[in-house]
Amino acid sequence: MKPVRRCALVLSLLLPAFAHAQAPVTATEAELLFRDVRVLDTARGTLGAPTDVLVRGNRIAAIGEGARANAAARVIEGRGRTLMPGLIDVHWHSTFTALSQADLLAPDASPDTLAATVAAESRRTLLRGFTSVRDAGGPIFELKAAIDAGQLQGPRIWPSGAFVSQTAGHGDLRQPHERSRRFFGKPSLAEEMGATFIADGRDEVLTAVRENLRMGASQIKLMAGGGTSSAYDPVDVTQYTLGEMRAAVEAAEDWGTYVTVHAYTTRAVRRAIEAGVKCIEHGQLLDEDTLRLMAGKGVWLSTQTLRPSTEAMDPLRREKRKPVIEGQARTIAAAKRAGVRIAWGTDFLFEPGLNVEQNAFILGLREWFTPAEILKMVTHDNAALLALSGLRSPYQGRLGVVEEGALADLLLVDGDPLADLDVLADPERNFLVIVKDGRVVKGPE
């Protein structure tokens, strides 16, 4: 069997293995009291006076004088430390960030071993303080179900499901020997494994979007332009006609949710805006007029703090990234000036060694934003983007804030991130307690 075929076949069998995966999960606390903590209000950029915060079930029940716990409550002594919302990454690939090409091609690779690798990375993501992620495409539904059922530890996941891509688009992941499903009748292995839908024409786009929604997608990820990690589509190309893109938007809106698109260029983004798309992933080649158009229409820019290259990148990818890297600083600065709603995510792919730097990549935002603005972006603002899913959101409730009634996703931090943002980059040392959905996943014995 050819290595590329074996790679895709093993991954196609990966996700059902989560049905057998188990990991210990802390039981839900009936009541959890944080005593003597300073609440970080990321929306306003302020750190409050010492107070108490009571969690009951999976929500924040009271802050201040009303935070009176019963005798059976678990008490965590804050000793004046910072209590802040959990971090949110809105461009994460839960499966593809956990596995390298070498993992997939290893002679002893099996669905069970690969599932264990993905599960372990999911737990590490949570222990880095990321209590929520928006999965921006790939095989995800079985992993999410295992986490939600308490079989695995991991962040809350807003799943997109399979990428929706035209033929020769950024999500056309076929190997050279694989021919078109439409002409030759056989889906590619990437399609079979749930990584992508290759959909051409309005009818196929409608079906692809509806298939993802049927499986539980909270939003739809569509490829509207070329990319740097794909072999066959140059960065400058525009993908999907206006009619095809409108079909995706119509299908998503009928389910009360939205489409986000992968796109870098002005031409691709303007077409997406005309089609009714609500969020642009990347956008590093946009001009100021288009950014002002985005601001006027309330379209989000989900951006990243990209580095020029890593050791794991092949030469083709490094070369294709050059214009994107060159445009990054200019575009983010212009987006801020224009008043675009900006969100942040990492977008790591097939480089598991990079995952330990997930927190450190937040610090790259300091080129354009103050610490207060960054903290707001990676909590409050990212939560507002998640909320665009409306009733398709898998977790109903407020996130990104420490407020009464909000969902209890919390970090007890040794330090003041407003004064020293670097504390976020060392979660193992500085995140003393991590709570997700009212459950203590890291904390004192």
Image (cartoon, rainbow, N blue to C red):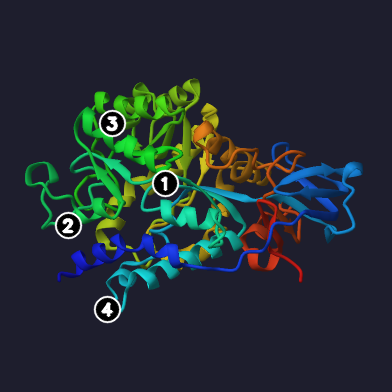
Q: Which residue is at the far bottom?
A: 108
The residue wearing badge 1 is: 136
Residue depicted at 60% across the width and 63% down the height: 127
- Of 294 and 379, the residue lying toward us: 379
CA distance separating discs 2 and 3: 25 Å
Q: Earlier in the sequence, mark 1 or mark 3?
A: 1
What is the crowding at mark 1: few (fewer than 14 residues within 10 Å), some, or many (at least 20)?
Answer: many
CA distance separating discs 1 and 3: 19 Å
- Of 185 and 266, the residue lying toward us: 185
Single out the mark in the foreground, 4 or 3. 3
- Residue 65 at x, y percent in the picture: 92, 43
Q: Which amino acid type is marked by label 1? A: Ala
> Which mark, by number, is residue 206?
3
CA distance separating discs 1 and 4: 29 Å
- Of 263 and 275, the residue lying toward us: 275
Q: Is residue 223 visible?
A: no
Q: Earlier in the sequence, mark 2 or mark 1?
A: 1
Quadrant of image for the C terminus: bottom right
Q: Which amino acid type is marked by label 4? A: Pro
The residue wearing badge 4 is: 107
Q: Is residue 268 left or right of residue 419?
A: left
Q: Earlier in the sequence, mark 2 or mark 4?
A: 4
Q: Which amino acid type is marked by label 2? A: Gln
Whether residue 405 is situated above or below residue 4 in the rendered picture: above
Whether residue 242 is situated above or below residue 167 in the rendered picture: above
What is the crowding at mark 4: few (fewer than 14 residues within 10 Å), some, or many (at least 20)?
Answer: few
Q: Earlier in the sequence, mark 4 or mark 3?
A: 4
